[in-house]
Structures are given as C-alpha cells and as structure tokens.
Amino acid sequence: MGKPKIISLFTGAGGMDYGFEAAGFETVVALEFDHDCCDSLRTSRPHLSVMERSIFDVPTGELLETGGLRRGDEFVLMGGPPCQPFSKSSYWARGAARRLDDPRADTLSAYMRVVEEALPSVFVLENVTGLAFSGKDEGLRLLLDKVQRINAATRSHYKPCFQVLNAASYGVPQMRERFVLVASRDGAPFAFPAPTHAEGLDKPALLDVGLLPYRTAWDAIGDVNPDAEEDLAVKGKWAELLPSIPEGQNYLFHTDRGGGLPLFGWRRRFWTFLLKLAKNRPSWTIQAQPGPAVGPFHWENRRLSVRELARIQTFPDDVQFQGTRSSAQRQIGNAVPSLMAEVLGRSIRTQLLGRTPVRGPLKLLPPARGPVPAPEKPIPVPEDFRKLVGEHEAHPGTGKGYGAKSRLRSVA
C-alpha cells in the first residue's frame, strides 16, 4: 500500500514534514517561497520535490501532478500559512493587529483554495494561538466558513477539529503553543493525542495518570559542543548584564520584585528580554528574529548554536540548515517542533487513514539525560549598570505602556 503521501504547503525548513516522516508518511511535494528554506530542504532530503514558488503562483493541478496525485486521492495536505497578523508579538509591537486586513492573511484563503481544488483525505493547518483568541477569532471563523462552503460545493464532509497544543506536553523540550486544525474529508472526528508529559511530577495525582516529566533543556542540548567558528557572543548594550541573571530568569530579576538590583520597572520589557535557559526546565519558545537582547540565551551566557536551536525544536540531527546564522535561526524559529508533528502524524494515520500504527518509541523524543548539573552562579552587576539603580514605575496595564502612549500622541 505504501506510505501515506503528503502535499506540504508553506513548508519552511520542514519541521512538520520531518515529524510526519518519522510517523511513516512521505512528503511528495513541498511548496516554499523562501530560498534558504528550499536549500535546507534540498540539502537534507535530496529526493524531495521542492517547488520554490509562491502559493499564489502555483495552480493546484500542478501541485497534484508533481506529487503524482489526482484530486480526491488518499493523501494529507498540511501547512502553516504565515502567521504574523495573528501573533502575540504583533500585539506587543503595534497594539491591536490588523489581522484580516493585513495582506499576509490572504495566505489562509490560498491554503483553503488548495483544499477545495485538491480534496485531500485529510488536511492539517497549524498556526499561532492568536488565530483563535477569544474576541479576535476572525481568522478561525474565516476558516470554518470556508470549510462549510467547500463541503456544500464538493459534497465533502470535512469536519474541522481544532485545539491549542503545548509542545512540551508531548516531550518537546520547549514551552511552545500552537493552534492545530485537523479535518477528514469523510467527516470522521479526530481526537487529539492526550498529553504524555507534565510539570510538577512530585504531585501524586500526576504520577497516578502515568505522565512523564517534561523533557528539559539539558535533555535536549546537554551533549552539544558548538563549533568554535560559530560566533555565539551576545551583542549590544545589555550583553554584559546577562551574566548577572540566574538560570531560568530574565530582566525581572533586576526589578524591585526580583532578587537582584532595581534596574528596571516591573514588566516594562517584553518577557524574552535577557531571558536565560534553566537546565532543569524546558526551553521557552525559540524566537525566529530575535533582537540582540532577546532570549532564550544559553546558561553559559551566550547565544544558542544552530544545532542547539534545532535540538530544542526536535529537528532530526541530519537536517542541515543553509544560509546565514540569522537565516538559520529564522528557519528554525518559524518551524513546528518535529516531535509534536510526529505525535500528530501517528494519530492521524490510525484514526483518519486506517493505517497500521507505528510501533516502538517516538523517534524524535530526546533522551532523558539523568542528573542535571547545578545551576551556574550569576556574577555581580557590572559597575556600568549600577547607575540604573533606583525607583522604576511598574507597567500600568494593557494599553497604557510607553508604546501605547506614543501611538496616542502620533494620532492626536
């Protein structure tokens, strides 16, 4: 019968594809516009048919022909349309985001156009959690409306099932939430896989239900020795302050509510400012385009290497990222954790495709590395930063910060 086939849209560096590959699927065509992502895909999987073009320029018939498929065949269509209009960082930077008025949101409609014209057995759409924010869920409502119209026009029975998943709950060594929608053409419901990992396993209630402890940053990267030629030094005006922050904390340590010196106002900065990994906890979300002071940083007070970033995102070790260091981080940071995709893929192949379950342990689950070394000791605050010591106002609340006031002045 062969492996279940995939048409992959907005493939990026292939995070979802590698996960489904580990679950016994085969991507027969990958559509991606970014050149470095395409180079990474071609280098890592030379057999893969990569179409380096925009979804707006590729007819659905060409996608099907390239993948050796016809409309209505058994295959999975998957992808994550670019999510910037719905992201939490968009709210932070600009207040209320433009969302559906943002031209980048047209990618949602483009994805659904391929669903209608290809009629896959199953389609999987992932995105940022902001797509389904309460009161700001117009993107989700657009998708659900389009599914209804597709069903009416094609006599299909797609039944969207969606949920926000935390990757750490499935063994990914990273706290990262993603919105995932799965729909089967025959109307079969999809039950999302139950969490297998959790925090706080000293609580008997969690032990009783058989959950495992979260995989940690140490599990993911404890054995990685970065290439000496990779420049991992922290840059910018705050670089020398980073060593004074303990593992697992950020700039809030240096506020009047933290344990350090009062250098900043409470919550006056974004959470990732001077954020440092803790060995004994999952990483925080890997950023695609971080500024010089944006973490998470390594506990050794440096940037994470490309291999460390990939490990935290659970890419297979044989994946090679092409392009500059910043391009590699963007490719990795924009990806879906491959392990989470492997877990989803195993459930989809059995529940919705009726295939034989994949036996054995998850291929992309990081090993538990045993005893975690003690935290690194922070250093005293350098003298140059002590001039910041003083009283600092806490953030006054949503819509009342420095950025919001600046926007109001510019409108007035």
Image (spheres, grey):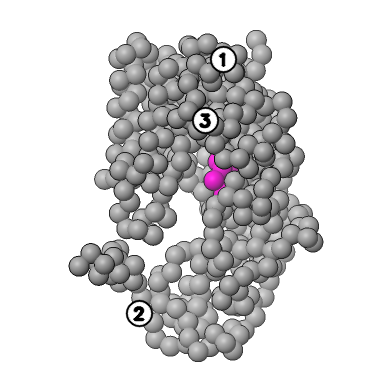
Report x, y in % for residue 134: 30, 45
Q: Between residue 165 and residue 224, name the one nearer to us.
A: 224
Residue denoted by label 1: 65
Sooner in the amino-acid sequence: mark 3 or mark 1: 3
Q: Disc 2 marks which amino acid?
A: Glu
Query: Quadrant of the rendered structure where residue 256 is?
Result: bottom left
**Numbered range of the magenta stretch:** 333-337
Q: Between residue 348 and residue 206, name the one nearer to us.
A: 348
Q: Is residue 362 visible?
A: no
The residue sitting at 59% across, 83% down in the picture is 381
The residue sitting at 44% across, 65% down in the picture is 270
Q: Disc 3 marks which amino acid?
A: Leu
Residue denoted by label 2: 393
The residue sitting at 43% across, 22% down in the picture is 115
In the depicted structure, whether residue 123 falls above or below residue 329:
above
Q: Nearer the viewer, mark 3 or mark 1?
A: 1
| Marks 1 and 2, how far apart at CA | 61 Å
Say which mark, if any, is on residue 252. none
Q: Is residue 374 visible?
A: yes
Q: Disc 1 marks which amino acid?
A: Glu
| Marks 3 and 1, how far apart at CA | 15 Å
In the depicted structure, whether residue 103 falls above or below residue 409:
above
Sooner in the amino-acid sequence: mark 2 or mark 3: 3
In the depicted structure, whether residue 20 falls above or below residue 188:
below
Q: Nearer the viewer, mark 2 or mark 3?
A: 3
Query: Quadrant of the rendered structure where residue 326 is?
Result: bottom right
| Circle 3: element type | strand
Say which mark, if any, is on residue 9. 3
Name the residue at the left extreme: 412
